Image (spheres, coloured by chain):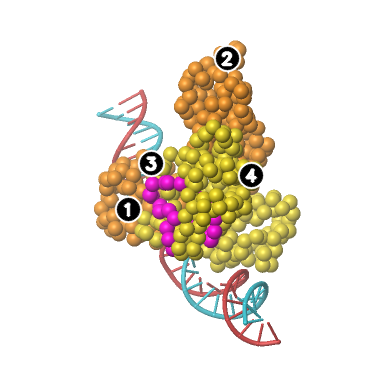
Chain colours: A yellow, B orange, C cyan, D red
Amino acid sequence: MSENNLYSKYQSILLKSMLFKNIEAGDLNVMLSCLKPKIVSFKRNDFLAIEGEYFDGLGIVLAGSVAIVKENAAGNRVIMDILSTSNMFGEIAAFSNKGIWPATVIAQEACTALFMSPQKIIGTCENSCRWHKLLILNMLSIVSNKALMLNRKVQYLTIKSMRGKICTYLLEQYKDSGNKTFMLSMKRNELADFLNVSRPSMSRELSRMKEEGLIDFHLSSFQIKDVETLKTQIDI
Amino acid sequence: MSENNLYSKYQSILLKSMLFKNIEAGDLNVMLSCLKPKIVSFKRNDFLAIEGEYFDGLGIVLAGSVAIVKENAAGNRVIMDILSTSNMFGEIAAFSNKGIWPATVIAQEACTALFMSPQKIIGTCENSCRWHKLLILNMLSIVSNKALMLNRKVQYLTIKSMRGKICTYLLEQYKDSGNKTFMLSMKRNELADFLNVSRPSMSRELSRMKEEGLIDFHLSSFQIKDVETLKTQIDI
DNA sequence: TATGTTTTGTTGCTATGGCTACAGATTAAT
DNA sequence: ATTAATCTGTAGCCATAGCAACAAAACATA
């Protein structure tokens, strides 16, 4: 299969990627011929990138799925994220000063990924300067939003007490929904993971809060009954 | 004082900022006339920006110092960072989709700051397209490094046990210095803050580890005596 | 050298929350 | 409709780490 055919096969997937936001199908081909990305297929459990090794290209998942895993110094692997088609990896490392992969990327199943050099993204060629600028701005937006998300995560992790974490989370949901009654999108396990606490301990605290008349809940539907008291309990 | 005089007064400070990295003194003036930044002075305890309010411009501290503070839902303020001259604030919010300040910025002492619109940074004008591109790439680098730093912080905060945090930190220092004997740059209090634990508890654990023959230390000088055992203790 | 200030180490007490194990609900699958 | 799988709530036990309070060491200043 020729390169152009390969590209066109994955065109709709690439257009869904944040990197090619606001870019039209017609222009994508011109850009790809300039970016000269490499398309590589992997078998299950193959390594797409290895933590600590030289960073050689921004990736986009074209087919299958990959796992982002972090190895601690003891060598144990923790899955940080699972990415499916159209998702990017390496976006933080690509334009930072540290030119190494901050995590390992493993094929969760047989998969295909596209790699491109960060330099090609920021480089200008005569015929597509306009698009390069769009690409760079898209990158800036992607990285900024990632930083914002990480910032929020740090906020939560910094709160020391179980009740403080729960109150902060519930008040944020209340603020976002504009309603004292709302549904949680996460299951108990996921929420416990997000807040970095154990599920039983979290459930225990939720029950206590229900008993105290601060909140009410059943499965994923929650109701805040006493906003003011909840606020005072945040830094307990 | 005319605007140009104002700019030249702060030229050397601006040139130290990461935003104007690789830009020469001569070019800076041209760029500033295009960016049209606002220079504003504040009295001690004045607000430079308020969390949750409409984001109106990227800032650089020109004189004095400012505090980045986060208010939790209960209204308590926690100082996240102190910035002195040449440091930026608002760099994460500037190019993210959420157009609001993620934190409050307060004048720690009488201070002066420069504000500029993110749109002006990414916008192109005829005479300085080249510089705009440089600015955008500098921004991309700044935000990427910030994201990488936040990522590292999340790593540490996610580790649950005291010993795990300490082992991870010491092994990172060992790896960075390439030597089993090294000096810590942080005081005990600062390190405890960074790891989000209490100082006495941290000291107690350090002493235990010394007793067990894993490490040795006196004040800021540390020595790792048993790398392998240290690694096995990371996820305890 | 003497004095004050900051930093570091140590200890006992105690609350918090992790862990395991299980039972009851709920959802999915056949 | 029945079974299987997953999710949620509860309880007891106990290790971890926070807190307060103090002593000792290091550093700063006169």
Label whose residue precedes the other's in the sequence (3 or 1): 3
Q: Which callout, 2 or 1, points at the residue further toward the start of the chain? A: 2
Q: Does the magenta stretch include residue B5?
A: no
Q: Give the range drawn in magenta.
A: A45-70
Question: Would you call the spot at circle 2 few (<14 residues within 10 Å), some (14-19), or many (20 or more)?
Answer: few
4 or 1: mark nearer the eye: 4
Disc 4 versus disc 1: distance between alpha carbons? 65 Å
| Pointer 4 with pointer 2, Cβ within 8 A | no
The image position of residue A109, as x and y in percent, is 49, 64
Q: Which mark is residue A149?
A: none
Residue type, numbered disc 1: Ser
Q: Mark 1 points at which residue?
A: B207
Q: How far apart are marks 3 and 1 (CA)?
A: 16 Å
Question: Residue at image x 73%, y 58%?
Answer: A181
Do labels 3 and 2 touch, CB within 8 Å?
no
Q: Is A3 situated above or below B53?
A: below
Distance CA(mark 4)–CA(mark 2): 46 Å
Residue under circle 2? B4
Q: Can marks 2 and 1 be said to lie on one chain?
A: yes
Identify which residue is drawn at 36% across, 58% down: A74
Q: Residue B187 carries which label?
A: 3
Of all chains, the one bearing label 4 is A
Of helix, strand and loop, which one carries label 4? helix
Image marks 3 and 4: residues in contact by CB distance under 8 Å: no
**What's the residue type where badge 4 is placed?**
Gly
Is residue A52 shown left or right of residue B65?
left
